[in-house]
Amino acid sequence: MLARSWGLFRSLLIYHAIPFRQRRLRRLLAPLVPPGSLAFDIGAHVGNRVRALRALGVRVITVEPQPVYAGLLRRFFAHDREVTVIEAAVGEQPGETRLFVSDRHPTVSTVSPTWRDRMGRHRSFRNVAWNREIAVRVETLDTLIERFGQPGFVKLDIEGAEAAALRGLSSPVAVLSFEVVPGAEDEAVSCIDRLELLAAYRYNWSPGESMRLALPEWLDAAAMREFITTHGRQGDIYCRLTTAPADPGARR
């Protein structure tokens, strides 16, 4: 219980108490997500991106599998009709799965045992332990779209399950983002591979928690794959649709 309380306090401090963080996040998202559009925040945690998107006039479907954090999001946005909180994971198929929870480091809780085992051996995760498992419901991006409509932006931060979530998407989205973590660069490359089956995208990179796009030009898929595999730094990849969808027969 103490570890869980510490993890919650630490997340609130990091994501809501650092000065100017919200301003930087709004500046990053404003050119990508127009007012009045719909966004899916997959892996919303304590809702810092929900706050930024709402400040930009964007309707948000926020998805979070950890019951403590889903409950926190419901309290934070209880009076905002433009925010819907879904307590679930997102994956390739709807159903149920196991969530490996790190109470002390809740941002790295994951539904992927492969990612957990790999990152557990990485030097940057040497103080992380996944101390319990819980059963969670699984939605797909397609089922969320069926319920809520086509999003203009999807943010994925789900610790090694991003590519699986994209396999549950059968139509392109205008703008997406997903995390890249040192030691699991192949997961990010798999996300690009999946997106390129749906349509052609251009890509940019936001290093660490900088809340800015660092590349002067948006890269094509081949250049971004090379960038990911050679730089080995943590950050978020932003993906912007550039052409019409690919052949529907290639989507599954």
Image (spheres, helix red, strand yellow):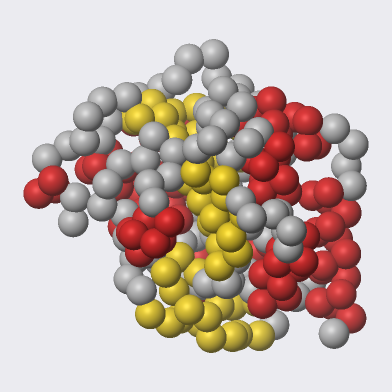
Q: Camera-side residue: 230 or 11?
A: 11
Q: Is residue 7 above or below residue 81?
A: below
Question: Residue 143, percent across and down?
Answer: 35, 64
Quarter location, residue 120: bottom right
Q: Camera-side residue: 149 or 27?
A: 149
Q: Is residue 186 above or below residue 209?
A: below
Question: Residue 12, percent across and down?
Answer: 84, 57
Question: Residue 65, percent across and down?
Answer: 58, 71
Q: Residue at x 67, y 42 (%)?
A: 54
Farthest residue in the top direction?
216
Q: Residue at x 75, y 29 (%)?
A: 24
Q: Is residue 226 above or below residue 167?
A: above
Is residue 120 shown to the viewer in this render?
Answer: no
Question: Residue 150, percent across and down?
Answer: 38, 47
Drawn side of residue 213 relative to residue 242, left or right: right
Quadrant location of the N terminus?
bottom right
